[in-house]
Amino acid sequence: MCHLNDDKKYADPNLIVGFDTSDDAGVYRISDDVALIQTLDFFTPVVDDPYIFGQIAAANALSDVYAMGGKPLTAMNIACFACSLDAKILADILRGGADKVQESGTALVGGHTVTDNEVKYGLSVTGVIHPSKVITNSGAKPGDVLILTKPLGSGVITTAFKFDMIDEHGLQEAIHVMSTLNKAASQAMQRIGVNGCTDVTGFGLLGHAYEMANGSKLAIKIFSSKVPLMRQVTELIKQEAVPGGAYSNYAFVEKWITFSQNVSQQERIALCDPQTSGGLLISVPREKADPLLKELHNRGVKWSTIIGEVTTKDNVDNVITVV
Ligand code: CO
Ligand code: CO
Ligand code: CO
């Protein structure tokens, strides 16, 4: 994860987005028209196939630039690899990453590998954006509608696969979702114009929704029955295929969330499931919600759907209400 919250001592007049918000990347103005977006993400394998892991890690690293409405320009590999392993595995990881970076239209310009018994891979991505067009997680406005662009459940599905509760076939949907770039979704929201955005990753939907509500000093309502889930997720949660992160996310956000009684325990866990390379959570003015959905669907972001709304904090019980 990429979030570090409480260090303000590096304040700089050109720093548009820095440590002090829970945003996805740093943004630094280099001229009146251009700001740099910089981000770094890397993690341990989420799937066994090294080539697919490389693709997913790259889609995830690029996502922090897309979540801000930026255009990634260059990317650099960061990898940890054990000497005892077959070097072909590292080559396959890097090939997966390179293919995904190329698909995004970004230039891969180098990288660095260190020896480590635990394999890790990711990228540092540099992008550009117009300084006045930066989309952050704190820009939501009262009356906005929330759109999510990918289904939830990658944490549960990959955990179930590790425990042999599903086979390769059951893993395919999660692989497809995780390796899909958020590029088309980002371009759609830039075209329509939105108020706020974040990508849904390690903190789960509710954790990232909480950051958005908190950053925007507003409240959020989530319609649990509208949130798209990958196949089998509720069933697998019942069978306890739940990653530890889902429980810690739940414990972290619980006090800011009021669940309506009809929201089952499985749904609550699914909403806290840590996502790898999850979708964008977009806060858009209500009158632009339909045009945005149309634009997303036209660009192939088929999962996109309205899952909630933004309100003021008046007359609500809590920061987040899940009905
Ligand atoms: Co990140
Ligand atoms: Co992010
Ligand atoms: Co080096």
Image (cartoon, rainbow, N blue to C red):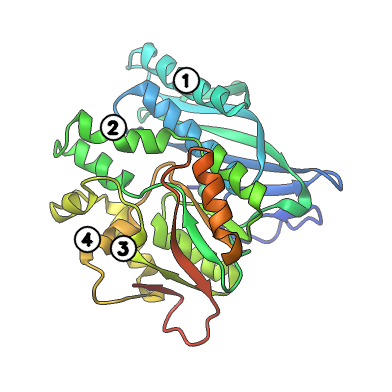
Q: Amino acid at mark 3?
A: Ser
* Earlier sequence position, callout 1 versus callout 3: 1
Q: Amino acid at mark 1?
A: Leu
Alpha carbon separation for disc pair 3 and 2:
23 Å
Mark nearer the viewer, 1 or 3? 3
Mark nearer the viewer, 1 or 4? 4
Which circle marks residue 225 in the picture?
3
Instruction: Please give the residue where the numbered disc 4 appears in the rendered image.
Output: 266
Choose top left, top right, bottom left or bottom right for residue 262: bottom left
* Earlier sequence position, callout 2 versus callout 4: 2
- Residue sitting at 21 percent across and 35 percent down? 170
* SS state under label 1: helix
Q: In the displayed image of the protein, which residue is found farthest to the right?
A: 32
Instruction: Please give the residue where the numbered disc 1 appears in the rendered image.
Output: 94
Picture coordinates of residue 240, whole percent (x, y): 16, 52
* Earlier sequence position, callout 3 versus callout 2: 2
Picture coordinates of residue 26, whole percent (x, y): 66, 48
Alpha carbon separation for disc pair 2 and 4:
22 Å
Alpha carbon separation for disc pair 4 and 3:
12 Å
Residue 3 appears anywhere in the view:
no
Between 211 and 260, the one nearer to me in the picture: 260
Which circle marks residue 172 in the picture?
2
Alpha carbon separation for disc pair 1 and 2:
21 Å
* SS state under label 2: helix
